[in-house]
Each structure stands twice: as structure tokens, then as C-alpha cells.
Image: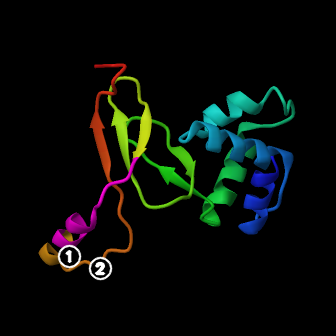
């Protein structure tokens, strides 16, 4: 629990029991939606509302403490901010896994073929996980 407190403080986010619970769930689950967070912690916080969870998640997003993963056809999922990575997404069960890939050649190719300056990239690969194959 102490590591989560330090993590929040380091990112200038006020430490509350609800935020600690949210951070712990993100750390344990990797990728989790607001509704999943709410359903998992509401027993410990009976007066907690879904709106409060959204408010806390948005606060952490503004501080770049967490990142949002938008997947077509699914609720947005959230994860703790960490080194750049891509995502593997199962089209059957919706499982999401991180994968470290060298995307430098893709970014270089995009720069050569467009007049864009690229500030951020996100790569999602869809398929079937080993459990669903």
C-alpha cells in the first residue's frame, strides 16, 4: 500500500482511500474499465458512486498518472502510465495484454509519407488469445 501512496504523492495527486483502491486495482489488473473498478471496490466504499470513480479517474488522467486505452466496441480501459508499449487485444474474450515492440520504423515511415509531426503513437493488435484459439 505504501508504494501506491508514494506513487500518488510523486505525481501530485491527493491520496484518498478511493484513489488508493483504484491504483491498486489498475496495478493488479493491468487494464480495467471504470465500471469494473466501481464494481470491485463498492463493497469497501458503500457510499461511493460511479460518478466519483469517473471523477477520480479523470483527475489521474489529467496528471498523466494513468493512460486511457480506447478499444472499438468496448468501454475505455485504464492503466498506470509506464514505458511506451503496444496492446494485444483478444477479439473473443476482450483480454488486453501489453507488448513491447519497436515501432520506430513505423513512425519513421509515417513521417516520410506524410507532412505530420508525430507526438504520440498507439498500436493495437487484434486476434485470439491462447485461451480462445
- Taking depth in this image into account, of 5 and 124 the one nearest to the observer is 5
Measured along the vertical axis of the image, is residue 100 above or below residue 40? below
Q: Residues within 10 Å of mark 2 (few under 14, many from 20)?
A: few
- Specify start and end residues of the magenta stretch as a single range: 99-109
Secondary structure beneath label 1: helix
Quadrant of residue 90 within the rendered picture? top left
Residue at 32% in and 55% down: 101
Q: Which residue is mark 2?
A: 117
Q: Which residue is mark 1?
A: 111
Residue 100 magenta:
yes
Residue 19, horizontal then vertical, whole percent: 77, 49
Residue 14, horizontal then vertical, whole percent: 82, 61
* 18 left or right, relative to 64: right
* 96 left or right, relative to 13: left
* 84 left or right, relative to 128: right
Q: Residues within 10 Å of mark 1 (few under 14, many from 20)?
A: few
Measured along the vertical axis of the image, is residue 93 above or below residue 14? above
Q: Quick check: marks 1 and 2 in contact, CB under 8 Å?
A: yes
Secondary structure beneath label 2: loop
Residue at 71% in and 43% down: 24
Residue 57, horizontal then vertical, whole percent: 66, 51
Which tag, 1 or 2, sits closer to the chain's start? 1
Residue 73, horizontal then vertical, whole percent: 38, 35
Amino acid at each position: 500500500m505504501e508504494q501506491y501512496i508514494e506513487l500518488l504523492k510523486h505525481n501530485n495527486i491527493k491520496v484518498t482511500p478511493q484513489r488508493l483502491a483504484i491504483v491498486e486495482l489498475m496495478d493488479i489488473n493491468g487494464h480495467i474499465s471504470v465500471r469494473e473498478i466501481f464494481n470491485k471496490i463498492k463493497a469497501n466504499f458503500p457510499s461511493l458512486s460511479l460518478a466519483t470513480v469517473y471523477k477520480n479517474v479523470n483527475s489521474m488522467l489529467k496528471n498523466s498518472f494513468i493512460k486511457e486505452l480506447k478499444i472499438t466496441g468496448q468501454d475505455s480501459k485504464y492503466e498506470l502510465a509506464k514505458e511506451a508499449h503496444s496492446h494485444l487485444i483478444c477479439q473473443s474474450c476482450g483480454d488486453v495484454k501489453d507488448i513491447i515492440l519497436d515501432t520506430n520504423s513505423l513512425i519513421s515511415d509515417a513521417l516520410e509519407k506524410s507532412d505530420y509531426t508525430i507526438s504520440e503513437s498507439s498500436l493495437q493488435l487484434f486476434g485470439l488469445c491462447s485461451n480462445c484459439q
